Image: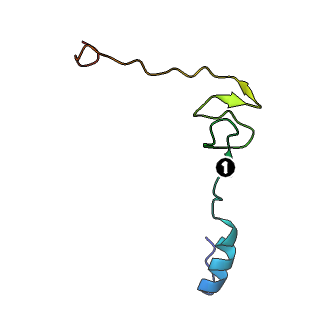
Amino acid sequence: MAVPKKRQSSARRDKRRAHDSIPAPRLNECPQCHSPRMPHRVCPSCGTYAGRQVIAQDTPSVDTSGRPEGR
């Protein structure tokens, strides 16, 4: 098996690793609800894309019975 003749310096190692970082995701502001969203994707908070409602958002129903859910 091949073995390096000389130890690689930390500067050379760091230069090689300079492009290995993961970039932060780009975020745009939703024109409807102004929450951050990824470009060219449906807004996860309001469900709109290109000015149209594509995902119907369910409003949480208020439980007035006072019992825990599922019973």
Asked which quadrant contains residue 11, the reply is bottom right
Asked which quadrant contains residue 50, the reply is top right
Q: Is residue 41 above or below residue 4?
A: above
Residue depicted at x 60% and y 42% = 35
Residue depicted at x 67% and y 45% = 29
* One can see residue 5 in this view: no
Q: How many marks?
A: 1
Give coordinates of residue 66: x percent, y percent.
23, 17
Asked which quadrant contains residue 63, the reply is top left
Residue under label 1, please give it.
27
Location of the N terminus (image quadrant)? bottom right
In the rendered structure, which amino acid carries the disc numbered 1?
Answer: Leu
Give coordinates of residue 15: x percent, y percent.
68, 78
Front one among 5 and 64: 64
Give coordinates of residue 25: x percent, y percent.
65, 52
* One can see residue 10 in this view: yes
